[in-house]
Amino acid sequence: MVTDVVVSVLLVAGALLSLAAGIGLVRFPDLLSRMHAATKPQVLGLLLFLLALAVESGSWALLPLLVLCWLFQLLTSPVSAHMVGRAGYRTRHLRRDLLTLDELDDVVVRAADDRDGPPPPDRGSGRGGGRGNGT
C-alpha cells in the first residue's frame, strides 16, 4: 500500500516535470530558452520515473541498469544542449534582445576574423620561372 502511494507520487511528479519540459519547448520564445526547458526538467523527470520503477520492482538487480540509464541521460543532455546552443548562436537563431549578457560575442567575432585572416601571399602569375614547371 505504501509503495503504491510512493510510486504514484514519483510517477505524477515525473510526468509533471516532463509536461513542463514539453510546454517550455512550445511556449518559450527563443532557442536558448527552449534548450533550457528541454534539458533541466526532463533529466529530473526521468530520474523520478526511474525511481518509481525501482520502488515498484523491489529488486536490487534492476538498480544498476536504472542508474546507468540516468547517468547516460545526465551526461548526454547537457552536451547535446551545449552543441545545439553553439550552433544556434553561430547561425543567429536566437533573440539578442532577450540576452542579459552576451559573453560569446567577442569570441565569435575574433574567430571570424581569424578564419578570414590576412590574404594569401602573392605567388605570381603561375607562368614560368618557378620550380617544377620543366623550364
Image: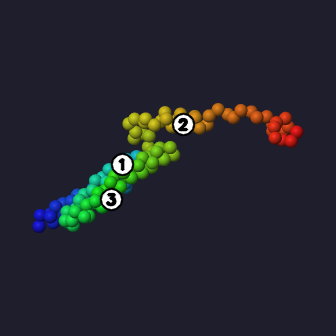
Colour scheme used in the picture? Answer: rainbow
Q: Which mark is residue 36?
A: 1
Sequence-wise, which precedes: disc 1 or disc 3?
1
Quarter of the image for the C terminus: give it: top right
User: Which one is nearer the viewer's eye here, 81 or 76?
Assistant: 76
Sequence-wise, which precedes: disc 1 or disc 2?
1
Front: mark 1 or 2: 2
Instruction: Tell me residue 18's x, y (percent).
Output: 30, 58
Tell me if 65 is positioned left or right of 81 in this view.
left
Tell me if 23 is positioned left or right of 107 in this view.
left
Work out whether 24 lies above or below 102: below
Which residue does the numbered mark 3 point to in the structure image? 69
Q: Which amino acid does label 2 sit on?
A: Ala
Instruction: Tell me residue 42's x, y (percent).
Output: 32, 55
Which residue does the numbered mark 2 point to in the structure image? 111
User: Which one is nearer the viewer's eye here, 30 or 103?
Assistant: 103
Binning the other alpha carbons within 10 Å of mark 2 as few (below 14), some (14 to 19) or many (20 upward) gives few
Instruction: Tell me the distance, in whole angstroms, between the alpha carbons under discs 2 and 3.
Output: 37 Å
Work out whether 4 lies above or below 94: below
Image quadrant where residue 54 sits: bottom left
Identify the residue at image location x=32%, y=54%. Answer: 71
Is any atom of residue 16 visible in this view?
no
Image quadrant where residue 116 sits: top right
Question: Could you tell me which secondary element the residue under label 1 belongs to?
Answer: helix
Instruction: Tell me the distance, in whole angstroms, between the alpha carbons under discs 1 and 2.
Output: 26 Å
Tell me if 32 is positioned left or right of 52 in this view.
right
So how many labels did they put on this image? 3
Question: Could you tell me which secondary element the residue under label 3 belongs to?
Answer: helix
Q: What residue type is labelled 1?
A: His
